[in-house]
Amino acid sequence: MRYELQGTPTNEQHGENIIRLYVRDASGAPVSGARVRVFAGPPPTGRPAYFEDDFPFRPTSPAGLLEFFAVAGVMPETRHYWAQVIDASGNTLSDPVQFHFPKGATIWITAILRQAAASGAPTTPTPATPTTPAPVGLDFDARLKDELNIIVEFASVANGAKYWKLVRAKYLPEGNEPGTAQGRVNMYYTVLDESGNSIPGQRVWQQWPDDRAAKSTGPDGVIDFNMSGDSSFDPKRGQRGPYSAYVDGLPSDKVVGLGLPLRRHVVYELTWRRAIAGVAALANSVISGAVSNAPAGTQVTLSGAANKTALLDASGNYAFTQLAAGAYSIAITGAGVVRSNLALDGANSARVDYAFAIKPPTPPTQPVQPTPPVQPGPSGKTLTHYLLLGAPNISATRTNLILALDYIARFAPVVGFSADEAKAAANVTLVGAGALSAADEQKLRDAGCIVRKITGADSYAMEKIFSDLIAAGNPFPNS
């Protein structure tokens, strides 16, 4: 055999059961991209197998390491796993290496396979190793690796072959502010084609020890999985979460170690794009535009497949160049998101203009009109004005909150998401269509609240309503 077991596998106590197989050449250097087949079965050979890995092989990392999560937590019964190096045709390059996990174990088992020393006898030619795509163009949140031990197993494919390339991996930590999980425990997966367009109906696999499940993307190319409470792990002890994710139908970059760190509510956002190995993705798209009547210091923020910020020039123009294929959003200081889900293919261009409303100057001879007094409610109300947004886990709520920031700064209402909390206010303003059910809205009226609504057909209409109320100096819409 080309590779031989070095010494006896070693065990370390941890919080889960993991196979760790190092593959090294004759000089002891790591062998990257070596193909390893994993199965489980009875000793002494592991055959016939009672478990075969979903993948025909798993490639070793640049460090020559193959890690396979056997079970997260305690091993429910004694099991014998096996790992074997194979070539591109499936021929064996090593004897199967046995990994023995006794019932109740929580161990990492490490073994080393090293290339046999050369002898006088002819040796089997070294098989061509497929190219492992480098993570070029990957927008990877550093906290995933540095704080949570989450890794990416990059697909091993030959040049010219299509595969699913991971292009974005984001982490939303625990919290209730924008940019945090806001109580959710979801993994959102987006799948794009070569031009950055959403792919509906594409199956994505969610894998965990001993099982896996698949869902298909919706019309927007997105699918989400929930994380269960037993996916908790302690990253400070070197643990990883039990979940892995990859896209079906082609070789796929795989994200390994997702879960709830110490049971905290967090969110993961992963995006794959169909790509061709060895072919650099075009990155010549441009988003440009002009912002009229903008206050000094206004910034334009690009987010999505890339994240950038630009200041307006003296004429109010901005531009983002050398953009790769993907979906993008444009936000402007004081206006919030003005364009979302803007699809680029790496070669096309798009223009996004925006105009701030011109506020007529106040005549210097007339005093500034104070804010109209809040209409009184029944006695016993502890709050004057409550701005009630929709459910915090809905993207439209986050967009409305961003659009309302200038309104909030101007009129200083109490801002929240709870109808029960809003009952303590004399005036309640509902933001967004469907922010509250008809039954809950009636409960507010029964509690003596004066209820009004700010609703619009889209974010542009919502932004205009907020701007008009600010310009009028009146926090309350007519309805």
Image (spheres, rainbow, N blue to C red):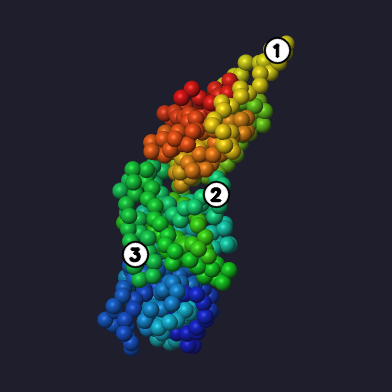
Instruction: Find out whether the residues at labels 3 and 1 contact each other: C-beta distance under 8 Å.
Output: no
Eye-nearest disc, 3 or 1: 1
Q: Quadrant of residue 129?
A: bottom left
Q: Position of residue 97 (x, y in %)?
A: 40, 82
Secondary structure under tag 3 reads strand
Residue at the spot of label 3: 212
Q: Position of residue 410 (x, y in %)?
A: 62, 30
Q: CA distance from mark 3 to mark 1?
A: 70 Å
Q: Look at 59% across and 38% down and name the residue there.
A: 382
Q: List the single residue furthest toward the front.
A: 379
Task: Depth check: give the residue in front, 32 or 244.
Answer: 244
Task: Depth check: give the residue in front, 431 or 306.
Answer: 431
Tag 2: residue type?
Answer: Asn
Residue at the spot of label 1: 366
Q: CA distance from mark 2 to mark 1?
A: 43 Å
Q: Position of residue 141 (x, y in %)?
A: 54, 54
Q: Look at 49% across and 88% down and name the residue there.
A: 7
First reached walking from the N terminus: tag 3 or tag 1: 3
Q: Which mark is residue 176?
A: 2
Q: Quadrant of residue 123?
A: bottom left
- Looking at the image, is 358 positioned above or below residue 231? above
Q: Position of residue 476 (x, y in %)?
A: 53, 26
Q: Look at 56% across and 47% down and name the residue there.
A: 177
Q: List the single residue furthest toward the left.
A: 48
Task: Depth check: give the residue in front, 38 or 334.
Answer: 334
- Looking at the image, is 340 positioned above or below residue 393? above
Secondary structure under tag 2 reads loop
Eye-nearest disc, 2 or 1: 1
Q: Quadrant of residue 19?
A: bottom left
Q: Residues within 10 Å of mark 2 (few under 14, many from 20)?
A: few
